[in-house]
């Protein structure tokens, strides 16, 4: 049903819309912020897993 749902031109259109909405100056800051948030989330999940394995053992 959704075999070819995302084509390369879809991503291009999405990038153009993001540039128009947010502007080219804000996009790098937003990407940096998203990267930091993902790193924090990853480290917290890793800490929870290690804490959970210590309590099970």
Image (cartoon, rainbow, N blue to C red):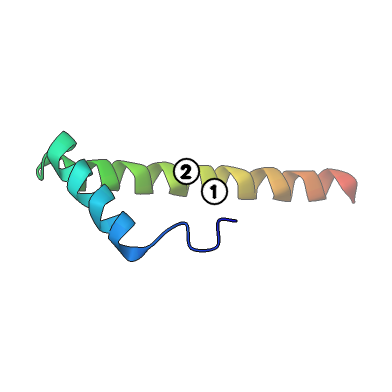
Classify 10 Å Cα crowding around label 2: few (below 14), some (14-19), many (20 and above).
Answer: few
Say whether residue 25 is left or right of residue 41: left
Residue at (62, 45) in percent of width and height: 45
| Image coords of residue 37 (percent x, y) | 41, 41
Q: Are marks 2 and 1 in contact (CB under 8 Å)?
A: yes
Q: Is residue 30 left or right of residue 22?
A: right
**Whole-percent x, y for residue 21 in the image:** 17, 35
Which quarter of the rendered picture does the N terminus lie within? Answer: bottom right
Which residue occupies the extreme top position in the image? 21
Determine which residue is flagged by label 1. 43
Q: Which residue is mark 2?
A: 40
Q: How far is the residue under mark 2 from the one under mark 1?
A: 5 Å
- Tell me the SS state at disc 2: helix
Bin the neighbour count of mark 1 within 10 Å (Cα to Cα): few under 14, some 14-19, many 20 and up.
Answer: few
Q: Nearer the viewer, residue 10 or 26?
A: 10
Dot label at residue 55? none
Say which of 29 and 47 sits in front.
Answer: 29
Q: Is residue 56 left or right of residue 47?
A: right
- The residue nearer to you, when weighing 56 against 2, is 2
């Amino acid at each position: 049903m959704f075999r070819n749902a995302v084509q390369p031109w879809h991503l291009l259109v999405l990038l153009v819309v993001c540039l128009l909405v947010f502007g080219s100056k804000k996009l790098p800051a937003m990407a940096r912020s998203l990267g930091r948030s993902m790193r924090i989330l990853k480290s917290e999940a890793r800490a929870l897993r290690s804490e959970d394995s210590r309590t099970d053992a």
